[in-house]
Amino acid sequence: MIRFIHTGDIHLGLKFNNVSFDREKAIARRREIWNTFERIIQYAKEKEVDFLFIAGDLFEEAYFTIGDITRVRDNFKSIENVNIIISAGNHDYRGRKSLYDRIQWSSNVTIFGGQAIGKKDFPDLNTVVYGYSWETKEIYDKELFKNFIDIDNTKNNILVLHGDISHNSNYLPLSLQELKDLNMDYIALGHIHKPQILADNIAYCGCPEPLDFGEEGERGIIEGTIINKRVDIKFLPFSRRKFIVTEIEVNENMNYLEIVERIKNIPEGNRDKDFYRITLKGYISRSIDMANIIKDLEESFYHIELIDKTIWDYDLESLEEENKDNIIYHYIRTMKEKGLDDPVVKRALYLGLEVLLKGRE
């Protein structure tokens, strides 16, 4: 039996320059990614795994320093009984001046090159690991496996690769069927940040920490075993925080406090630690100040962004009375005839009134 952890797309050193949260949270998030990386190292040690597979984008080449890569090396050295396998990706690509080649690694670390698929034999574990590192930021080559040799089926055969299962990608396009045809016991993929188990023995681990609101849902690592050529893998949530994007419906009968409580009672995630982006929809009294709602919610959430897509409620009877025989009056009457029980009609009425009343002003 062999035990392994599959991770990748950690993006150590990311600066978070183009995010919606403030600089203070961005700096904290950068530290949290380091913390999660070091928790993975500790977890690998506690579980006494045989392999830690890192399927690319371990760090951000543009922002990483010698001090940073030395810290990575020291973490790897602290688990010398774990074989660490790295196939570099497009953010940590192993080019001519790669930080991967600027320091001396401990003997338990294998970093694949980029000329062709390489392999490393582990006779004591009856296992061969194959891998390939990027040497540039983009790869269009679709013939990576053209000269791939037959594998020894008496051993565990594992491939670690950073690429995109897509025919029209600039990021090492891969074919799922082609991967299946390799007859590997396990294929550890990186590049796609959403964890995906594509087959019994092929998976994207996803990123262990989500990076922005485009990365909703659980994030973590994959744990696996191979026993007598039988593979068993499972996804393990591991992130400190989640990004949550959701909608909340309000109505014109809700007062200020009721709206605030509705938002506070959101069932998803953990308000004390997660990032929330909430869209408010529905009808709302014109007396309610949305700016105050946002201020009142900030103390109840670690991070909240409120997107206001509500429509102001109108007193239709008063408007009809005030606008006898003009376009506003006739518009209201026409829409009432269509039936305000239909939410589409009601929404059209209110949006139209907003335009007409602004035009009158």
Image (cartoon, helix red, strand yellow):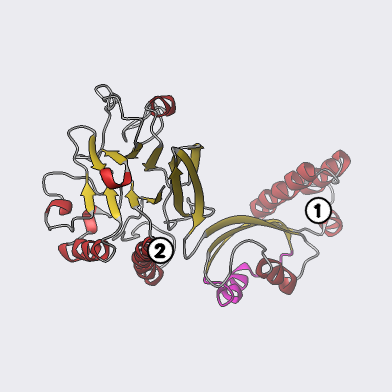
Give the number of the disc on residue 43: 2
Depicted 135 relative to depicted 309: above or below? above
Please provide percent x and percent y for residue 298: 55, 74
Q: Is residue 170 found left or right of 317 in the rendered image?
A: left
How far apart in space, not on screen, are marks 2 and 1 (Cα)?
70 Å
Please provide percent x and percent y for residue 101: 13, 51
In the image, what residue occupies the spot 33% across and 59% down?
17
In the image, what residue occupies the spot 56% across and 58% down?
244
What amino acid type should be assigned to the residue bearing mark 1? Asn
Label 2 SS: helix
Label 1 SS: loop
In the image, what residue occupies the spot 69% across and 54% down?
357
In the image, 311 versus 282, the foreground residue is 282
Whichever of labels 2 and 1 marks the residue nearer the N terminus, that label is: 2
In which quadrant is the C terminus drawn?
bottom right
In the image, 36 versus 312, the foreground residue is 36
Neighbours of disc 2 within 10 Å: few (<14), some (14-19), many (20+): few
On whether residue 271 falls in the magenta region, the answer is no
What amino acid type should be assigned to the residue bearing mark 2? Tyr
Give the number of the disc on residue 293: none
In the image, 43 versus 207, the foreground residue is 43
Give the residues in magenta: 285-302
Give the number of the disc on residue 323: 1
Please provide percent x and percent y for residue 111: 21, 47
Depicted 208 relative to depicted 94: above or below? below
- Quadrant of residue 310 within the rendered picture: bottom right
